[in-house]
Image (tube, coloured by chain):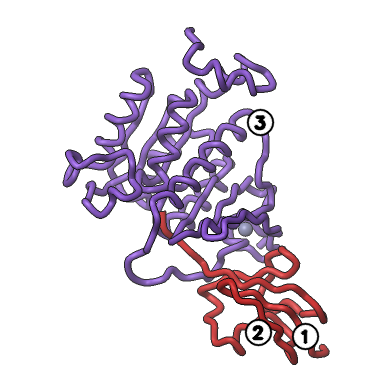
Chain colours: A purple, B red
Amino acid sequence: MEYARWSRQILIFENGVKDQEKLLKARITVVGAGGLGSALLMYTVAAGIRNIQLIEHQRVEESNLNRQILYGEGDINTSKALAAKRKLLEIDSQANVEVVEKKVEDSEKEIILFDPDILIDCSDNLEARRFLNRIAHIIKKPFLYAMVEGFSGMLSVVYPYESACFECAFFGKVQKEGTTPILGATAGFAGALEASLAVQIILGKKPLFGELLSIDLNKPSLQTLKVNRRKDCYVCGEG
Amino acid sequence: MSVARVNVVYKGNEQVISEVRTVKEILEKLGINPNSVIVTVEDELVAEDYVLKNGDKVKIIDVISGG
Ligand SMILES: [Zn+2]
């Protein structure tokens, strides 16, 4: 194996090349190749995470281009998943990108079969996150989620049955109607942060355990909020 | 349950709200739909029935869901 490509990051890993090998063997399921997904996917593939299941069923639209930097003008009206895969293979031709062109709610079988080490949410709605939170508790693998709007973001990791789950924090919450305003850099910042967390999780760390990171890029500021497990949670509780 | 006087930050504005017992009452006073926000007290996420103490630092954060 030629490691020159990752030599600068191997320098920061506690176990050097061994840690790089963990990344090369890791499997991640990524839901959504939009604003969050663009940054997350490019940074994870560049870091040597080569086994990726990508769930995305939309086509590229012109209004995506302010933030979805996986795509260019030539990709408009084509499949996002396939355009994303092309771009990722340009970064690393040995990446294995399994494309699932379905809504996430219809992809349970594929996710379980793929058997990821982490479920990574880059979706654009609460229902997808509720679904992924439940799947994470079935397969008992960490679930990394991020949500963005305007200059704001929220980000956390769920360690099933150990730390607060998505519903412990967001049960009953509803999504705003209409088009979400967003600066591309906000999605990119949160997506890059997800990539950094994914690397740490694969290397055996437990970042943001029981914590929700609140991002305000207007100020800018980052704040860590404590989130406790709810005994009555219908996903992770004692119920 | 006695009433409390607390500091509330919402959308970047800080204000003092008095005569409230729970987080739910703060949201009612401000006319905020509880399903559209999360609330922290001293940087810890709390439920609507959380009982407030004098001087609590409360933050109300809009739920966002985009990607
Ligand atoms: Zn829970």
Which corner quadrant of the figure contains ligand 1?
Answer: bottom right
State which quarter of the image contains the N terminus of chain B: bottom right
Between marks 1 and 2 in the image, the one whose residue lies nearer the viewer? 1
Disc 3 from disc 1: Cα separation: 44 Å
- Give SS at disc 3: loop
**Are the numbered discs 3 and 1 placed on the same chain, yes or no?**
no
Disc 1 from disc 2: Cα separation: 10 Å
Q: Residue A89 placed where, x, y %? A: 32, 25
> Crowding at label 1, few (<14), some or many (≥20) Cα neighbours within 10 Å?
some
Q: How many marks?
A: 3
> Please, which chain is the residue tagged with disc 2 on?
B
Kindly indicate the quadrant of the structure image that contains residue A239.
Answer: bottom right
Q: List the single residue furthest toward the bottom.
A: B19
Q: Which mark is residue B26?
A: 2
Between marks 3 and 2 in the image, the one whose residue lies nearer the viewer? 2
Say which amino acid is labelled 3: Gly
- What residue would you read off at disc 1? B5
Residue A166 shows in the view: no
